[in-house]
Amino acid sequence: MTRSATARQRAAVAHVFRRLSMGPQPDLVLATADPHAAIARALDLGAPAAVPPPMTAPPNYDSARVVSAIAEPIAWWIGQMRTSPRLIEERLIWFWHDHFATGLQKVQIPYLMWQQHLLIRQHATGNFATLLKAISRDPAMLVYLDGVTNTARERNENFGREAMELFTLGRGNYTEQDVVAAARSFTGWVVNVPGRPASRGLTNAPWTSTFVPARFDAAPKTLLGATANLDLDGALDVLLAQDATGIRIATKLYTELVGTPPPDKTARRLGRGFRDGGYEIMPLVAAITAEPAFLAADAIGAKVRSPVEKLVGLTQAIPPASVAVGKVGPRAGSGSAAGRLGLGDVLRTLDYVPFFAPNVAGFPKGTALLGPHQFVHAFDLLAVYPSAPAVPATVDGLFTRFALHEVGDRTRAVVKREPDPTRRLALVVSAPEYAVT
């Protein structure tokens, strides 16, 4: 095989690993024969699942509102993205984290956000219907979309609307009357927050959700043509029975993995197969990776790499001796404090911190990640290194560590002209070829 053919083969293998995990996996790229072997490796869930670190339940509401408590979980999760052998699992955990977006800015309780993460981790490769029903009664979601204030006497339609618009059907597949019916069906759920007046009399465990019949609208509802005394699970079953739900989730996951939206015919075929197959997630993933479009030339580099993917890729390419956690939370200024930064600080400057989705639609994607702010602060990623990192001596060796096997002549020349190894690393991190995936 010629050098150019070898480069193309490795670029195709690298494409598979980038799309089916959260990083470039440079060592696996060199060890994997072809893209089909890469798909099989990436979808392999045979390795034991990770054991997430525990988080102690806070004794009351006031002590629970310590934002820094989420810093260690963020560091652990990014570590999993970097090192887990269960590649597709980490990609899907991020996908569902973004699909069912919540933010600590409103939830305010890191413990609830971490419990939601564990819930998503449990179901990420399992069954979408099961995940949907679990997330709909998840305490963090109930707080974030005001489910705890949704009662028969005082209806709140936030979750009902988003459950259809974002989590299942998509716009154009329901009416305002359906929003009302869904909201009525979702009434009655509360969260036991110790130390809060609203939790007096609740018998469920602290920081868990429970159904209170007295708060539930028990009258019949008509949702998408189905009339019954629908409760939360009943209403979700109506949503899950619709063609639109399977098609929308299949379309969104296809776009995530392939990089471009599917043709309508493909979306309908995959979506109906997903629904008719009981909403099992891994068969849908396998079906998407079997589509010719997944390995097509125009799929390579069709997506913009997110800051989280850039950070994971950087730490896979040049593993730091140690990684600080740093601060967390939304960006609070136009720069970073002097000195060594940790994971939280690095992502904070890029406005892309896990558990801090900017809104219910999730994190920015595509060209929204290509602005001047993102470009300037991409250099902050290098702050994860406590000292000068061990950068490969050759330009080709450096590109290989980032699984960049087809690099433009201009990028190669710019990097080659720079004699300082750390600045060379910064140039690769900011290169156009690393900006896309």
Image (spheres, grey):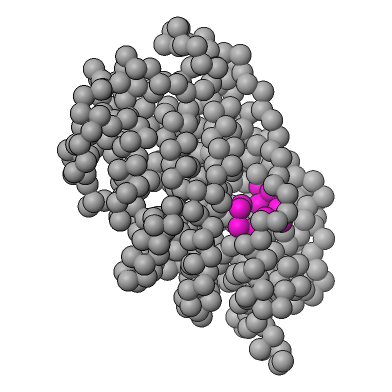
Q: Position of residue 300 (x, y in %)?
A: 53, 74
Total numbered labels placed on residues in the image:
0
Specify the quadrant of the image occupied by residue 122.
top right
Quadrant where the N terminus sits is: bottom right
Q: Residue furthest bottom?
A: 2
Instruction: Inspect this view and state whether residue 145 appears.
Output: yes
Q: Position of residue 206 (x, y in %)?
A: 55, 17
Specify the quadrant of the image occupied by residue 65.
top right
Left or right, 174 with respect to 301, comes to left
Quadrant where the C terminus sits is: bottom right
- Residue under the point 41% across and 11% down: 198
Identify whether 310 is placed above or below 119.
Answer: below
- Residue under the point 55% across and 17% down: 205
Left or right, 264 with respect to 181, comes to right
Q: Please tell me whether residue 89 belongs to the stretch shown in magenta.
A: yes
Specify the quadrant of the image occupied by residue 66.
top right
- Residue under the point 66% across and 56% down: 45
Instruction: Inspect this view and state whether residue 383 appears.
Output: no
Judging depth in this view, the residue of 180 and 29 nearest the camera is 180
Judging depth in this view, the residue of 283 and 259 nearest the camera is 283
Q: Position of residue 214 (x, y in %)?
A: 32, 14
Q: Position of residue 337 (x, y in %)?
A: 64, 39
Q: What secondary structure is the stretch in magenta mostly built from? A: helix
Q: Please tell me whether residue 169 belongs to the stretch shown in magenta.
A: no
Judging depth in this view, the residue of 37 and 127 nearest the camera is 127
Identify whether 370 is placed above or below 416.
Answer: above
- Residue under the point 26% across and 22% down: 217
Left or right, 341 with respect to 88, comes to right
Identify whether 307 is placed above or below 287.
Answer: above
Identify whether 285 is placed above or below 148.
Answer: below
Q: Look at the image and give the residue range highlighted in magenta.
A: 78-90
Judging depth in this view, the residue of 187 and 391 nearest the camera is 187
